Amino acid sequence: MNVLIRCNAGDKYGLGHLSRCSAIAFSLFENKQECFFLIKTDNKSKIIDFLKTRNISSNKFIFISERIS
């Protein structure tokens, strides 16, 4: 099964939503499920660094610009 997690994170939104979603993703990865992130952010580098600390591969996330409504 493929799972897409959509969340907001960055300077404006903080990292709480992403932190909770990454915990769900970790559980899915442990159960051999594919999990991807679609993230609306105003600070892409902050999110990349955060997800790397959670051992989530960079090919598992896509970014939406903050300027897109």
Image (cartoon, rainbow, N blue to C red):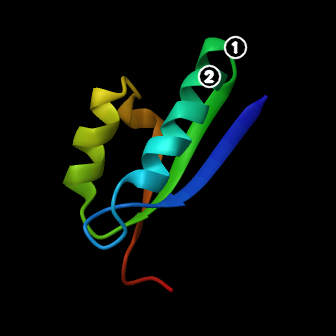
How far from the left and from the top, in percent, is residue 28? 66, 24
Image disc number at residue 27: 2
Q: Secondary structure at mark 2?
A: helix
Separation of residues labelled 2 and 1 (CA atoms): 6 Å
How far from the left and from the top, in percent, is residue 7? 53, 59
The quadrant of the picture occupied by the N terminus is top right
Q: Is 15 on the left-hand or right-hand side of 32?
A: left
Decide if residue 2 is in sight here: yes
What kind of residue is marked 1?
A: Asn
Identified at 51% across, 86% down, the residue is: 69
Kindly identify which residue carries mark 1: 31
Q: Mark 2 touching mark 1, by CB under 8 A?
A: yes
How far from the left and from the top, in percent, is residue 64? 44, 67
Say which of 33 and 15 sits in front. Answer: 15
What kind of residue is marked 2?
A: Ser
Decide if residue 62 is in sight here: no
